[in-house]
Image (tube, helix red, strand yellow):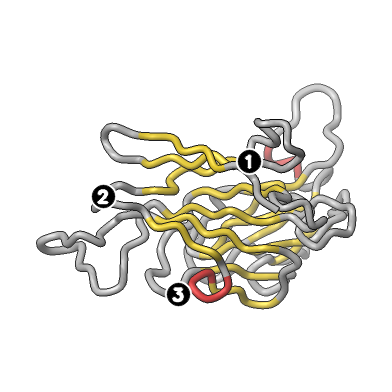
Amino acid sequence: MSGGTRFGAVGYVVSSVPSGEVYVGDVGDVGYRVGGFTDVVDTIVYLHAGGDVNGDGHLDVLVSVAQRSALALIHGPIPETGERHVYTDHDALLYESLNYDYLESVSAADRDADGYGELVIGEGSWTRAGSACDFGKQDGCNVGAVFTVAGPLGGHVDLMVEADRIEGPAQDGRLGQFVHAPDDLDGDGLADLVISKGSSTGSLYLLYGMR
């Protein structure tokens, strides 16, 4: 796209893919391009279908930006072509103000059947306030945390203030390295949630949806 915005990192949302081989360099001609910073190193680690956070009947999109320390929310529907600088042009920006660390995993589902999608965000390296991790690790270091924030969302959203939080139980337990809402596993009409604890032994936790 000559003459367009210069992106530091680029991801693509493609609603219809042409037949045959499609090269990454050509995707911008058939998809909607989203990018991160222009003047500093940035990485878009993932694009994620973020459920219907604002309850308008369209799937929304989450984009990791700012070296994974923030998530930009874009409300659907997403145009088939075009481009967007998501760090400055977004519908909501989610971050965690205690550690400003990697938001490693994200999933979305309507877990309470209120018509709005909830975002579930895992931060396996989350550390409790006052716990040092660099020299002589303390009990709260890398316990991990899982944040749940309910839609609709707008503006800047500090997960430490506006989200429910589940903290990991032990140092280096890294709760939340993986989160996934695999739909309704117990047949009660509510989406359930799977959370990993990424220690050397590893564990998976299943949380049922609640009204």
14 on left or right of 101: right
- Residue 178: % across, % down: 48, 42
- Residue 183: % across, % down: 69, 36
Distance between the Cα atoms at labels 2 and 3? 20 Å
* Mark 1, secondary structure of its residue: loop
- Residue 108: % across, % down: 67, 49
Whether 26 is drawn above or below 98: the answer is: above
Q: Residue furthest left?
A: 136
Residue located at (89% from left, 53% from top): 57
- Residue 4: % across, % down: 76, 64
Whether 205 is drawn above or below 112: the answer is: above
The residue at which mark 2 appears reads as 172
The residue at which mark 1 appears reads as 192
Residue located at (32% from left, 63% from top): 127
Amino acid on which disc 2 is placed: Asp
- Given this view, does label 2 or label 1 mark the residue nearer the observer? 1
- Tell me the quarter of the image containing the N terminus: bottom right
The number of discs equals 3
Residue located at (17% from left, 63% from top): 134
Amino acid on which disc 1 is placed: Asp
CB-based contact (under 8 Å), mark 2 and mark 3: no
Of callouts 3 and 1, the N-terminal one: 3
Whether 88 is drawn above or below 197: the answer is: below
Give the number of the disc on residue 97.
3
Of callouts 2 and 1, the N-terminal one: 2
* Mark 3, secondary structure of its residue: loop
92 on left or right of 179: right
